[in-house]
Amino acid sequence: MLKIVAVGVAALLVTASPLAHAQAPSAGVRVPATDLGTLTNMQIDLVKAALQLTPEQEKYWPAVQDAIRTEAQDRQGRIAVAAKRLDELRQNPIEILQAPDPVENLQRRANALAQRSADLKKLAGAWQPLYETLTPDQKKRMASLTLFVLREMSSSMELQDMQCEEQN
């Protein structure tokens, strides 16, 4: 049991950090979509292995896996749009300053948040039936993995912020 958690933590450390770094277009890091797809697959496999699903629970897994992949693909799309917008701003900084469009900015942000919301609802809806069948031990492992990933992503984002500040 402890080995599985240790392997899970190590794999999440390896996979979560690059994903978080890939989300910062200002840091100059561009991870190819194929690599992000591979990392997403690794995360999916890790979660499934850590949960040690029973044959009865396995029937709920395809929906969870699909929701995770959809959320990851949509996140990649949002990152690409943000990177493109940042490149545009860098190419025409004076033009942007002369004619800012706060309504357009609000609309763009609202659309991104609406997509993120839909993805999270789909993910929660996919997890719900499986989560109800998990044993207390499986729920503990899931909670541990979740906390670890959130902490790692937070640490990675803080590191990116410091790197961006150093570049400015």
Image (cartoon, rainbow, N blue to C red):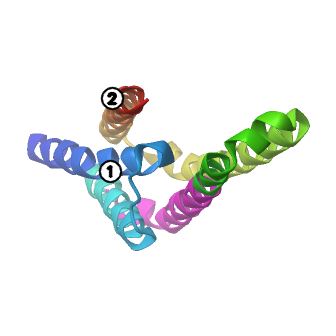
Q: Kindly give the residue lying farthest to the left in the view shown.
A: 3
Q: Kindly give the residue lying farthest to the front in the view shown.
A: 94
State which region is magenta.
53-81
Examine the residues drawn in magenta and state their main secondary structure. Answer: helix
Magenta residue check for 62: yes
Magenta residue check for 80: yes
Q: Residue at x 49, y 48 (%)?
A: 25
Asked where in the image residue 134 lies, by quadrant, the reply is: top left
Give me the disc on residue 117.
none
Expressed as whole percent of the image width and height from the top left, the position of residue 44 reads 38, 60
Helix or strand or loop: what does disc 2 sit on?
Answer: helix
Helix or strand or loop: what does disc 1 sit on?
Answer: helix
The Cα–Cα distance between marks 1 and 2, rounded to whole angstroms, is 12 Å
32 or 145, nearer to the observer: 32
Instruction: Characterize the local packing of mark 1: few (<14), some (14-19) or many (20 or more) Cα atoms within 10 angstroms.
Output: some
- N-terminal of the two: label 1 or label 2? 1
Q: Is residue 120 visible?
A: yes
Tell me the residue that label 1 is attached to. Answer: 18
Q: Kindly give the residue lying farthest to the bottom in the view shown.
A: 34
- The image quadrant where one finds the C terminus is top left
Asked where in the image residue 102 lies, by quadrant, the reply is: top right
Amino acid at pointer 1 = Pro
Expressed as whole percent of the image width and height from the top left, the position of residue 64 reads 52, 59
Q: Is residue 72 left or right of residue 29?
A: right
Tell me the residue that label 2 is attached to. Answer: 155
